[in-house]
Amino acid sequence: MPDYSHAMTPQDCLVAVMIAISASDESLRTSELVTIERIVNHYPVFAGYDQDRIRSTAEIVFELFAEEDGLDALFGLVREHLPDHLSETAYALACDVAAADGTIRDTETRLLEEMRHELSISRLSAAAIERGARARHMTL
């Protein structure tokens, strides 16, 4: 497995988490990709972020997902390069992407559970973040 640790910025980690949740069900849905693009374009944490890095970060996620222990490696990179104070942000972004198409699939639910554990998100914080994502993505 190649060494990606030199290439990851905190923003790359946030993008990687969003790409990972979108790809978790082996289908990148348009609504999820549009949500990722909207988030990167408008959220303050991405101010100054080079959007050309999204493609290379996505390639890293896909390469890691092809490996046997790729998910563990991805979380290792995220823990190494994402400041602790952005853990809840990463989880919130993942929840928004998962909810973007109106359905959270079992694979997405399992990955969100793993993210909660890997990012040390408390159950109470996770529940609040999840409820906020659900509220933002409600339809009539």
Image (cartoon, rainbow, N blue to C red):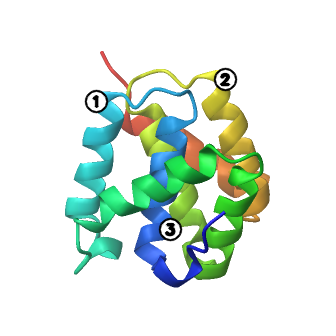
Name the kind of residue labelled 3 in the image: Cys
Residue depicted at 58% across the width and 79% down the height: 5
Q: Considering only order in the chain, which callout, 2 or 1, is on the residue closer to the N terminus?
A: 1
Name the kind of residue labelled 1 in the image: Thr
Q: In the rendering, at what x and y percent does residue 50 appear?
A: 23, 74
Mark 3 surroundings: few (<14), some (14-19) or many (≥20) residues within 10 A: many
The residue wearing badge 1 is 30
The residue wearing badge 3 is 13
Q: In the rendering, at what x and y percent does residue 51 appear?
A: 23, 66
Q: Secondary structure at mark 1?
A: helix
What is the spatial separation of the Cα atoms under label 3 and label 2, in whole angstroms? 23 Å
Q: Is residue 27 left or right of residue 81?
A: left
Q: Considering only order in the chain, which callout, 2 or 3, is on the residue closer to the N terminus?
A: 3
Residue depicted at 53% across the width and 61% down the height: 90
Residue depicted at 61% across the width and 45% down the height: 65
What is the spatial separation of the Cα atoms under label 1 and label 2, in whole angstroms? 19 Å
What is the spatial separation of the Cα atoms under label 3 and label 1, in whole angstroms? 21 Å
Q: Which residue is more in the foreground, 120 or 132?
A: 120
Q: Secondary structure at mark 2?
A: helix
